[in-house]
Amino acid sequence: MEHGVTHIEDVRVTDLSEVAEIPPDHDIRAVGDALGVEETNANVWYFEPGDEIGYHAHADQEELYYVIEGEFSLKLGRSGETETTAVGPGTFFAAGPEVGHGYRYTGDDVGIVLAIGAPPVENPGLDPHDLDDAGE
């Protein structure tokens, strides 16, 4: 990919409940795929009240998030060292490789989060508690 431009409304919404290999069951817009990026995952995630991305980690991926709309309860940190924080629109948060992260939508309407990760990964993540066990 050399360069690209797209508008969010031009990116197809994918219902992940129809893709058995990829939990959780949220709607996303795969912005990175629409632009043809190869070295980064970039997705816009949509949340209904109570929806969440469970606490997980990635072996090699660093992720950056930006809350576009809604209020979220964020769990961030290595297993046994997590912090829980309320975040809202305009908040950035990030997690490096092997650092646990997850968040739950606590708002009443639709919540929206931009997630960018590099290098791209196809798996749904690792259990951060297993990473601690491997290091002992």
Image (tube, rainbow, N blue to C red):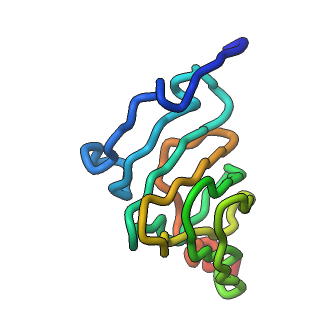
Q: Would residue 134 be visible to someone looking at this image?
A: no
Residue farthest front in this picture? 109
- Estimate the x, y position of residue 63 in percent, counting from the top left: 68, 52
Quarter of the image for residue 41 reads top right
In the depicted view, which residue is nearer to us: 118 or 86? 86
The residue under the point 63% across, 24% down is 37
Q: Pick the residue in front: 44 or 100.
A: 44
Q: Is residue 15 above or below residue 59?
A: above
Q: Give the percent coordinates (x, y) of residue 29.
A: 47, 38
Residue at left offset 70%, top offset 83%: 83
Question: Left of 50 or right of it: where is 118?
Answer: right
| Nearer the observer, 48 or 34 | 48
The N terminus - image quarter: top right
For this orientation, the residue located farthest to the top is 2
Q: Residue at x 63, y 25 (%)?
A: 38
Q: Position of residue 87 (x, y in %)?
A: 66, 72
Residue at image location 39% in from the left, 73% down from the top: 50
* As drawn, 60 above or below 126: above
Q: Residue 71, position in %: x, y?
A: 57, 70
Q: Quadrant of the C terminus?
A: bottom right
Residue 69 shows in this picture:
yes
Count the marks.
0
Q: Is residue 12 above or below residue 60?
A: above
